[in-house]
Image (spheres, rainbow, N blue to C red):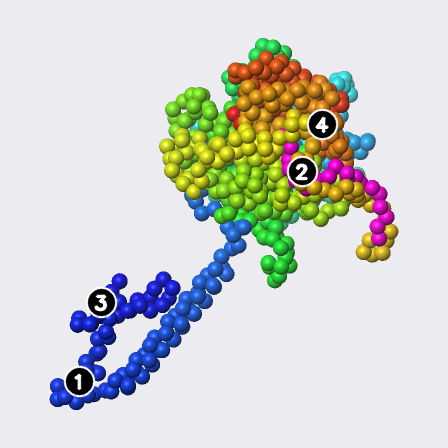
Amino acid sequence: MTGASRRSAHGRIKSSSSSSSSSGGGSLRYPPSIRRGGKGKELVSIGAFKSNLKILVGLMLLGIAIIYFVINRIVVSHESQKPPRVITPFPAPKLMDLSMFQGEHKESLYWGTYRPHVYFGVRARTPQSLVAGLMWLGVKDEMYVMRHFCENSDDLSSFGWREHNGRDFGRQELVENDMILETSFVKSKGDGSSGYGGDWSVRIDVKNKGLSGDAKRSAHLFFYLADEGGSVLNLGRDALDFQGSSRLVSGSREDVGDWQIHLRSENQLETHYSGFKTPHIYNLSDLVQRNLALQARKFGRLQLSDTSEDSSNIYVFQISGKLPFTIDIPFVSGIRGESSNVEKRLISLTGLPLSDLLRKKHREFDAKFTECFNISEEHDSETVRVGKTAMANMIGGIGYFYGQSKIYVPKSSQPESGDNHLLYWPAELYTAVPSRPFFPRGFLWDEGFHQLLIWRWDFRITLDIVGRWLDLLNIDGWIPREQILGAEALSKVPEEFVVQYPSNGNPPTLFLVIRDLIDGIKTEKFIASEKDEILSFLERASVRLDAWFQWFNTSQTGKERGSYFWHGRDNTTTRELNPKTLSSGLDDYPRASHPSEDERHVDLRCWMYLAADCMHSIAELLGKEDKFSKEDYNSTAKLLSNFELLNQMHYDKDHGAYFDYGNHTEKVKLIWKEVISENGHLSRQLVRKTSGKPKLRLVPQVGYVSFFPFMSRIIPAESPILEKQLDLISNRSILWSDYGLVSLAKTSSMYMKRNTEHDAPYWRGPIWMNMNYMILSSLHHYSTVDGPYREKARGIYKELRSNLIRNVVRNYYETGYIWEQYDQDKGTGKGTRLFTGWSALTLLIMSEEYPIF
């Protein structure tokens, strides 16, 4: 830089080398006005010059200070307008902007059964969608009850998808006390004249269950259309006078153009309707029930009012008839004027043509299932049917959500609002769900297990789902672990569980499926074009995965090198027997009795090993080992798989098991205590009493956490420690049962102990399929590699696999459901039913498909 002066990096003024006198190094070059005149007269004295120079320098410094002040105010103002970091998106191109997720892929997935929380629903993958759904009147305790949202309390004998391909077809059965509803959904692009996403049709078969032909009962179905954007819907002219075919409702949307939805049936039916104007649909069943109740009181009839509110954006159609009956409800879009083409499309989506199409889709589902999951002949048809149900419900349970997560911040950080949360940016999420009745939303650690199954069916759906989760990454590299997006999702969750904590993580199980895909590439399970798609995805995903890893590696590290601990445990509670570790996903699994920063959690250490090793594999695969120069993933993976260091930190020789480390005492229990509340009332509460002083030590609780090094395959095949692990697994007095491995040793001080007055044991005994699957996976691994314990591992593997499959199949036929967990003593299903999240991994156990941890 040249000139009289310049600002240094610290704001000071330097004289430039070009300002030096030609005759004297560093002397000032005076301007002509202060040089001696040609007549020998001095124009300005040296003293006056120095005085003027001081004034000039002072003015310059003042000007600089003013400029600095103004710039600082601008910067501060700009910074104050920035959103807090916790709700700032990660600054990298989104995965969903990749070309592979545009065009035909995006349109083919536009419409779907993406409303897992209702018994049957259709919507598009767009924030303000046209939404369809089904309600019906069931009977409970000799009274009518409205069925709409999936509820455990509804006591349906069975419900769920029997077939679903994730794209354009699904068939579901819902079994009431004396009635069976079969709902089928199919899409069609036809001759290409339809609107975006194509046409679709719903068939509903309503049948008697075990009743004679003379004992016919009436059924009342309620099919509805709602526009989430509030656009007005147009009621069909013949909606009331049903004569085999009616146009129920029509409208126009920017995405699909003009559309119509019709009702067709060959049965004698009675129809009624009601129109509503409301911005929400989560309370629609309440509106319908109030309308029915009013009509019943006024006229003694169980029928809708045949009225509509002004500018209705929701129409509900009551369809009543004697069992059995069948109705077809086709949706056609992209209509351009009154054209015979519409009738042709309607015909193709109803009656015999629809029956033919559904049979074709059924055959295709069976063929693809056989192709994707090579189930051996050792399994009978009943077992295979459960496998198909697991697959169909996993992929049929995929939902689309849109909204903003609530993120915890201290109230002191935003005193003007007084809230304890901020809103994340508005986001879309396309994801599988653990359970339609109880957990119909996205859970981060569940999703990795879900995708182990889904990618084998349709890897592009997996990439779409994983990409959307990674696009939720914030600037710090954190992803909210539970996604409660939109009014319908919020309506199912108690307020105290809605807010997400940015200090807390969740097992990074997405690395499980990414590692599995990489292994698939290496073993040539994909053709060249499929491989290219996966590599393109990993190329863009790598920067987000790197940031996600770095978040864990900075925020969840322990005091010792190579140690980690889950944040979020409550170290002040007096109500919990052992403070929960919700962030680990294992909730009430016993950890150190007194939470502290001295803890070391062996499961998180193993998750970090998986993540580091996976990142190293990505770098190798992409040929960019230097891409992540800030973190040498190879050396991190080697550190975390260092067998000696692992043993020093976590191995207990007396138990032959791996344990957490922390401030712990076994002498804790819950006791009843009389407590005076703030309002002065006396009450009895169950509180924790500690009778022994905690000390830093290994936490002697044998259970799922103890086997994470085994699951991670860190233990050498020739190590005597492997034999001890196998002995623990197969010991009937510790973990083994005829139904699977229990979650906590039967000898544990916490086995089947309640954590609070209201919290029954969750991960303290019951059998969980995801952990059994991971342990089984490693048993399979050790049964195939050379080592002195190979045959022992093989024997345990075969017996455990058989026990798990047999118990899940038995429960399905006894209860009609796949369950969240299974009883530690009797093997009966427990927790929530239709838990076809990770319990659906039973199918991979049948087909012996296991990931590389």
Give the residue type that dot 3 points to: Ser
Where is 173 relative to 403, above or below?
above
At horizontal 65% and vertical 30% (from top left) the residue drawn is: 652
Residue 819 spot, x, y in % from top left: 68, 27
Question: In this rendering, is residue 86 above or below 118?
Answer: below
Q: Quadrant of residue 580?
A: top right
**Earlier residue among tags 1 and 2:** 1
Which element type, helix, strand or loop, lies under badge 4?
loop
Q: Helix, strand, or loop for circle 1?
A: loop
**Mark before the other along the chain sequence, 2 or 4:** 2
Q: Residue at 57% across / 35% down in the picture? A: 605
How far is disc 1 from disc 2 in space, using C-alphas?
Answer: 88 Å
Q: Main secondary structure of the magenta part?
A: strand
Say which amino acid is labelled 2.
Arg
Residue under label 4, please give it.
Answer: 745
Q: Please give the range of residues in magenta.
A: 658-676
Report which residue position mark 3 lands on.
18
Whole-angstrom CA distance, mark 2 to mark 3, is: 69 Å
Residue 254 appears in the picture as rendered: yes
> Could you give the CA–CA distance between mark 4 and mark 1, rounded to whole angstroms?
101 Å
Q: Residue furthest left?
A: 39
